[in-house]
Image: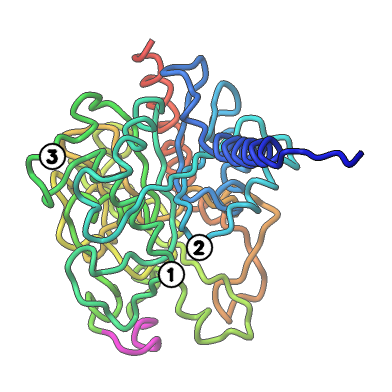
């Protein structure tokens, strides 16, 4: 006798297994969905959890500049970003990094719905309420259309969805000129710590309604050629023009240069430095804050005062944006050596440059000490 089977149970089983697998995959990349409101560990949300970003955090931990115990770092990203975060997940898994998690956001974002309640608002709120601080890292240029400007020929737009995500979140966190009546998340928790690095600092400004100078050398200084930029002097190079002129020399594309700390700014009023201090920093950027966002103020500039090097928030005391890169591992490694100009006869470490120009090394260390302290203090305040 021929045996017959109903196809329906098998179809239902298939759908169940398929959806179950999909839901499991999604939940494993959405840490905050199942996270308790508070935890015994500090929870730090970071945006742009690329391999480079993760490696920087790993190295900072090794150097003792970043908390090594009682911390969970959650990499937040949008599913439509161009960065391949699967590589980041593989790296975390292969290295047994139980302290690093991921949270994928999928809500619809476009340049017209960023600065208002949108399909990501509840996700943003959940991340904010269950985190003890946030870092926004460096990257490519923000599309100028977002801050209602035309696009300069030198502006390089590469990751629009990343900017959509981060700028919308920053607006939700801090509010902005885009909607004066919007109630910022930090109104309920003004001590919440936020650090913006390079692009992250620019994003803090744009997210609160500010604009950017799209190319410092051509717009701010009126220079058209690299040879003219070189004549400005190294203190006014925010990337290394020599690396572009002499690619065969294999020069470091970044620039080490001193900055000026404003007396009323956080570095002098809270972190422990004097207005006479001119610490050296490492930078690689061609844009900066122009018109300042809502309640954003300048904390540091270039020596000539023309370039914004750091910003902070007037109302929320633990919000800081730096236009330079205190997270780069090469700053803290004697073994990593570079040539900066064609005339350099030998390589030198960036750490040696920091050490020979005090208080440059202390300046970098205190930025991380300040932020780490604010994370722990905020975590304690939630108990």
Q: Are marks 1 and 2 in contact (CB under 8 Å)?
A: yes
* Residue under the image location 14 percent in, 44 percent down: 295
Question: Which of disc 2 and disc 3 is earlier in sequence?
Answer: 2
x then y, percent, for residue 35:
49, 23
Q: Are marks 3 and 1 in contact (CB under 8 Å)?
A: no
Q: Which region is colored magenta?
A: 223-231
Task: Pick the quarter of the image with the N terminus.
Answer: top right
Q: Is 330 covered by the magenta stretch?
A: no
Question: Which of disc 1 and disc 3 is earlier in sequence?
Answer: 1
Q: Nearer the viewer, residue 263 or 295?
A: 295
Disc 3 target residue: 182
Q: Is 229 covered by the magenta stretch?
A: yes
How far apart are the alpha carbons under marks 1 and 2?
Answer: 8 Å
| Label 2 residue SS | loop
Comparing labels 1 and 2, the label whose residue is closer to the camera: 2
Q: Nearer the viewer, residue 360 or 146?
A: 146
Q: Nearer the viewer, residue 131 or 289?
A: 131
Above or below, 105 relative to 344: above
Q: How many numbered tags mark residues here?
A: 3
x then y, percent, for residue 332:
59, 48
Disc 1 target residue: 158
**326 left or right of 93 in image:** left
Return the residue found at the far right.
Answer: 1
**228 left or right of 350 in image:** left
* Residue under the image location 15 percent in, 60 percent down: 291
* Residue under the image location 7 percent in, 44 percent down: 180
Residue 82: assigned label? 2
Task: Pick the quarter of the image with the C terminus.
Answer: top left
Above or below, 66 relative to 94: above
How far apart are the alpha carbons under marks 3 and 1?
Answer: 29 Å
| Label 1 residue SS | loop
């Amino acid at each position: 006798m021929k045996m017959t089977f109903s196809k329906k149970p098998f179809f239902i089983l298939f759908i169940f297994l398929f959806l179950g697998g999909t839901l499991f995959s999604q939940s494993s990349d959405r840490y905050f969905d199942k996270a308790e409101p508070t935890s015994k560990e500090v929870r730090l949300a970071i945006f742009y959890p690329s391999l480079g970003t993760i490696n920087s955090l790993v190295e900072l931990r090794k150097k003792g500049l970043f908390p090594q115990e009682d911390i969970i770092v959650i990499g937040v990203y949008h599913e439509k970003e161009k960065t391949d975060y699967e590589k980041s997940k593989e790296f975390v898994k292969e290295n047994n990094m139980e302290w690093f998690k991921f949270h994928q956001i999928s809500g619809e974002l476009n340049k017209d719905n960023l600065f208002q309640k949108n399909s990501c608002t509840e996700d943003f709120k959940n991340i904010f309420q269950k985190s003890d601080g946030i870092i926004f890292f460096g990257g490519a240029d923000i599309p100028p259309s977002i801050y209602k400007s035309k696009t300069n020929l030198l502006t390089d737009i590469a990751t629009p969805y990343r900017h959509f995500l981060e700028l919308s979140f920053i607006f939700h966190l801090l509010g902005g000129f885009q909607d004066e009546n919007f109630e910022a998340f930090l109104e309920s928790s003004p001590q919440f710590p936020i650090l913006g690095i390079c692009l992250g600092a620019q994003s803090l400004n744009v997210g609160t309604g500010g604009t950017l100078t799209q190319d410092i050398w051509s717009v701010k200084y009126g220079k058209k050629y690299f040879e003219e930029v070189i004549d400005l002097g190294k203190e006014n190079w925010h990337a290394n023009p020599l690396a572009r002129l002499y690619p065969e020399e294999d020069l470091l594309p970044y620039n080490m240069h001193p900055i000026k700390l404003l007396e009323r700014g956080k570095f002098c009023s809270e972190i422990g430095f004097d207005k006479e201090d001119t610490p050296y920093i490492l930078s690689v950027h061609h844009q900066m804050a122009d018109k300042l966002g809502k309640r954003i103020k300048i904390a540091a500039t270039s020596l000539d005062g023309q370039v914004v090097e750091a910003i902070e928030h007037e109302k929320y005391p633990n919000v800081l944006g730096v236009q330079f890169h205190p997270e780069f591992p090469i700053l803290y490694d004697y073994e990593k050596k570079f040539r900066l100009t064609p005339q350099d006869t030998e390589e030198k470490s960036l750490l040696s440059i920091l050490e020979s120009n005090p208080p440059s090394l202390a300046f970098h260390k205190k930025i991380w000490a300040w932020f780490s302290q604010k994370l722990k203090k905020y975590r304690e305040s939630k108990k």
